[in-house]
């Protein structure tokens, strides 16, 4: 199959659509982030790519504490709203039922099936965006999303962002068992 060369851009599939929260002058603020990924297993760490102008980033830098809330597909309208409007214009704290865990400056969203309390470790200037590297200090999961002490991603029903088409999607059918399907059974196969 022939390949087509396109302009260098940020392409990665899938990308989670998460809600990042911080406290700004005593009020919770949330923004939608799709540039989110795992940085390390030990200590558990996460990365976020954030535009420098974001109000949520101001709160993150002040206290070094923030939340990453993983919404289900049922929250798609509110997730999109949080990405469209700044906390400078709209009070997004009224959109959700907010609670706090171990970190008192990391507002968590009750309606999201998974909540991460995070502590900012490092901020790297990447040009148009800052790269946030943070330690995950706390993980809270709705008990109905658990299956034998494991998180069931189909019960979480996380929202996925498709960058090139600007659409939201959901998890599709399974393809194979990881760490099993690639085990060599026939030495001649590869």
Image (spheres, rainbow, N blue to C red):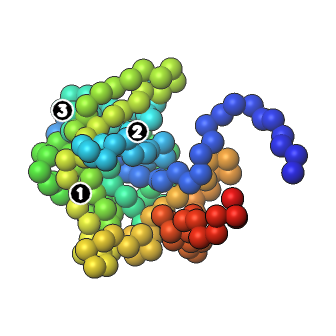
Q: Mark 2 or mark 3: which comes first in sequence?
A: 2
Q: Is residue 131 above or below residue 168?
A: above
Estimate the x, y position of residue 62 in percent, counting from the top left: 21, 28
Taking 182 as reference, is 56 above or below it?
above
What is the secondary structure assignment of the residue under circle 3?
Answer: helix
Report which quarter residue 71 is drawn in. bottom left
Q: Earlier in the sequence, mark 3 or mark 1?
A: 3
10 Å neighbourhood of mark 2: few (<14), some, or many (≥20)? Answer: many
Say whether marks 3 and 1 touch (CB < 8 Å). Answer: no
Label 1 residue SS: strand
Which quadrant does the C terminus fall into?
Answer: bottom right
Residue at left 56%, top 68%?
181
Residue at numbered disc 2: 48
From the top left corner, tell me how far across and down residue 87 is, in percent. Answer: 36, 40
- Residue 44's x, y, as percent? 27, 46
- The answer to whether residue 59 shows anywhere in this view is no
Q: Which residue is mark 3?
A: 63
Q: Of helix, strand and loop, which one carries label 2?
A: strand
Say which residue appears at 47% left-offset and 27% top-offset. 129
Q: Measured from the top left, where is residue 72 in percent x and y?
A: 42, 66
For the residues marked 2 and 3, what is the alpha-carbon distance in whole angstroms?
Answer: 17 Å
For label 1, count other residues whose C-alpha is less than 10 Å away and answer few (under 14), some (14-19) or many (20+): some
Of residues 96 and 18, the one drawn nearer to the viewer in this rendering: 18
Specify which label sits upstream in the sequence, 1 or 2: 2
The outermost residue toward the right is: 2
Mark 1 highlights which residue? 139
Q: Nearer the viewer, mark 2 or mark 3?
A: 2
Residue 59 sits in quarter: top left
Q: Is residue 121 visible?
A: yes
Q: Residues within 10 Å of mark 3 (few under 14, many from 20)?
A: some
Q: Residue at x 48, y 42 (%)?
A: 35
């Amino acid at each position: 199959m022939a390949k087509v060369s396109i302009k260098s851009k940020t392409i990665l599939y899938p990308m989670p659509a998460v809600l990042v929260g911080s406290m700004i002058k005593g009020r919770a603020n949330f923004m939608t982030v799709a540039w989110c990924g795992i940085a390390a297993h030990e200590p558990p760490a996460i990365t976020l790519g954030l535009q420098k102008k974001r109000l949520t980033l101001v709160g993150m830098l002040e206290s070094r504490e923030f939340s990453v809330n993983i919404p289900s597909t049922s929250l798609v309208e509110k997730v999109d709203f949080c990405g469209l409007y700044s906390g400078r214009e709209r009070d997004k704290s009224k959109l959700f039922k907010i609670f706090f865990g171990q970190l008192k400056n990391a507002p968590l969203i009750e309606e999201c099936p998974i909540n991460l309390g995070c502590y900012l470790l490092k901020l790297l200037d990447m040009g148009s965006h800052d790269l946030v590297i943070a330690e995950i200090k706390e993980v809270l999961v709705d008990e109905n999303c658990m299956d034998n002490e494991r998180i069931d991603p189909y019960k979480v029903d996380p929202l996925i962002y498709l960058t090139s088409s600007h659409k939201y999607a959901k998890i599709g059918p399974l393809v194979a068992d990881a760490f099993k399907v690639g085990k060599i059974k026939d030495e001649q196969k590869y």
